[in-house]
Image: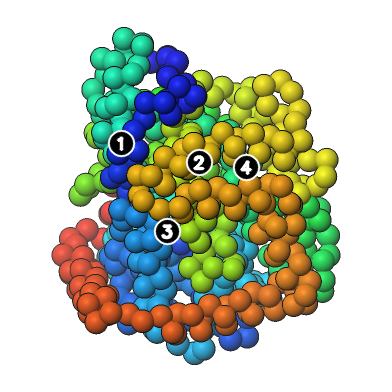
Amino acid sequence: MSQPESTSQDTLTTWVDSSLLRGMLRGIERESLRMQSNGFLSQAAHPQGLGSALTHPHITTDYSEALMEFITPPQDSIPGALNYLSDIHAVVHRQLEHEEKLWPLSMPCMLDDAEERIPLAQYGSSNIGRFKTLYRHGLGVRYGRRMQTISGVHYNLSFPDALFEALQQQESDEALKNLSLQDYRSHRYFGLIRNFIRLTPLVMLVVGASPSVCQCFMTGREHHLLPLVRGTLFLPYATALRMGRFGYQNSAQKQLGIHYNNLSGYLEGLQKAVKTPYQPFSRLGLNDAQGEPIQINDHVLQIENEYYSLVRPKQVPQAGETPSQALANRGVGYVELRAVDVNPYSPIGIDEHTAGFLEVLALYCLLKDSPALLDDEQDIIERNQAEVVNRGRAPNATILADGQSYPIEDWSRSHAQAMQPLAELLDQAYATTLYSQGLATMLGRIDEVDATLSAQVIEDTLHQGGTWNFGSHMAQQHADVYQAHVLSPETRAYFEEMAQQSLQQQQQLEQEQTLSFEQFLTQYR
């Protein structure tokens, strides 16, 4: 379906009632490495007291056994989500052994020269558990394990159906008026996604917090980074190296041509990537000399989740569904905003200013006109992103938009100011000042570049004498916060029960399987 013009955001705020925004849901996923007391990546297994990383709904691991991931369920307010995340951190902290701490930065703590010292996440002996570990092994073979030690924050957000119903009634395009609510909702979420991609440079500028990196991360790689202090590399005006070419990049995915212009086109592109062999990955082989598998397959993507993107359309999968099948069956249910660095100054990696700003920005992206995003514009966006990643705080940094070049602060300020009525609308809906305060904080960072997180990180890294010293200093401060955090008896009991239940579920999966892993993998391949 071609992209019809939707109602423009300027006229919307005159009729969108704040009551239509009640019922938004948000959930947060935060990643963090476990660090040994000597500053190196933990080599220890996932703490047994936290349950099974395979089946626990809130506490799991990502790429590495040492890369923890904390997941809140959907919450009806920002404070609710942040409090839940605080509880998870306190629960985890109490189970860490051997004086381990949670590393507070997006870019990793100290890594050994040997990549094998980045242990792959282990999920037990069930076929699904071994499959997850094999997928991670494949990522390491394809892109190197170092890249996979980077942490981020993913912000999941959904808007209430009442808002989509009201928006659909205001449409002048008959084709849009006649869509089912499910299809219309997906159409609007894809509009949000395209606009979020266009505005990612703004996100990187105001919440980017990875302008420097431990020298060990760059071992064996060519780079253009400069020494900041001994053992730390940086770029003078960088904001978010995590989002640049040293972060989650995948050259194979460049050629995919996955577009966000509608759901069917997006799913088609994703399916093609999961099924198309890619010569450089074929050359790596499927198995090693001993016949042990080293990657799931030699396709552009081993599985759908390998597709790295700044923002993802999501739907909760039901039993046996892939993410794509869930989207095809029930449309987009929420969006996952992924371009967010861990905030090293917050014990939980994100604060209410960032959360409030992201929700205002998402509403702005939803309501604003969102023409189709084609290759020419995509190239310009990638140029803008690279500019902000590498030199977003430079006095002469520019953004290309509408065929013109703008100073980055002018471009950023014009969008942030246009969001002001939406921040007020959200404040009204939730009887708070959180949204206006969040937006005001980001406007402050646009106006004064030294107030950005990336500028603070550089200053504090210099002051502390390097990335490791700065990270360790913040990790200790955060550990004190987790230690002091009071868990209610109900919360404590809940997490103890979840840990037990998850271990039982993993055991059940291991006992019930009938196929060997070889047969399981052959069937999948």
* First of labels 2, 4 by sequence position: 4
Q: Secondary structure at mark 2?
A: helix
Question: Gap between marks 2 and 1, in whole Å?
Answer: 17 Å
**Mark 1 residue type:** Leu
Residue that badge 3 annotates = 29
Which residue is outermost to the bottom? 98
**Mark 4 residue type:** Leu
Q: Secondary structure at mark 3?
A: strand
* First of labels 4, 3 by sequence position: 3
Inspect this view and state whether residue 78 appears. Answer: yes
Name which quarter of the figure residue 217 lies in: bottom right
- Horizontal placement of 369 versus 133: left or right? right
Q: How far from the left and from the top, in percent, is residue 65?
A: 46, 71
The residue depicted at 63 percent of the width and 54 percent of the height is: 208
Mark linked to residue 361: 2
Quarter of the image with the C terminus is: top left
Residue that badge 1 annotates = 20
Q: Secondary structure at mark 1?
A: helix
Check whether the beta carbons of the residues at disc 2 and disc 4 lie within 8 A of each other.
Answer: yes
- Horizontal placement of 392 versus 141: left or right? right
Q: Secondary structure at mark 4?
A: helix
Q: How far from the left and from the top, in percent, is residue 242?
A: 63, 54
Question: Gap between marks 4 and 3, in whole Å?
Answer: 21 Å
* First of labels 4, 1 by sequence position: 1
Check whether the beta carbons of the residues at disc 4 and disc 1 lie within 8 A of each other.
Answer: no
Mark 3 nearby-residue class (10 Å; few <14, some 14–19, many ≥20): many
